[in-house]
Amino acid sequence: MKVSKWVDMGQDVEVEIGADDIRYALSEAFSRVIQDPLGEAGPTRKDVTRALNDIATFLNALTDPQIDLLNLGQRSAVHAHLLKTAERFKIPGGME
């Protein structure tokens, strides 16, 4: 008797993501989390987590040479904004 079985090899792969892919993903992320103009149901938890994943993918895709294109003031402003935004996600009561 033969039995077929799916085996997950758990292999890490690297996939090249182009600028157009990122632009589309961010556009989709934004559209998923804004309130519907007709007043229908707002975004779901899945919508928000998918949007956050798309944003994280974008930020991780930026290379050090791309970041180096920013002047010190711009880098400082981005750094301050990301820190402020990260604080919004901090778990109340210090549980992390």
Image (tube, helix red, strand yellow):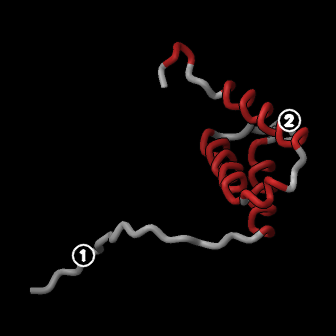
State the image coordinates of residue 7 (x, y, percent, origin top left): 29, 72
In the rendered image, the residue lying farthest to the top is: 93
**Of all residues shown, which one is farthest toward the bottom?**
1
- The answer to which quarter of the image holds residue 57 is bottom right
Q: Where is residue 61 in the image (x, y as percent from the top left)?
A: 69, 59
Compared to residue 25, the image places residue 38 above or below, namely above
Position in image of residue 29 (x %, y %): 74, 51
Quadrant position of residue 16: bottom right
Q: Residues within 10 Å of mark 1 (few under 14, many from 20)?
A: few
The amino acid beneath tag 2 is Ala
- Label 2 residue SS: helix
Kindly identify which residue carries mark 2.
Answer: 77
Given this view, does label 2 or label 1 mark the residue nearer the observer?
Answer: 2
> Alpha-carbon distance for marks 2 and 1?
52 Å
- At 79% from the left and 31% from the top, the residue drawn is 80
Is residue 61 placed above or below 75 in the rendered structure?
below
Residue in front for this viewpoint, 20 or 59: 59
Residue at the (74%, 38%) spot, across then down: 41
Regarding mark 1 in the picture, which secondary structure is present there? loop
- Residue 5, label in figure: 1
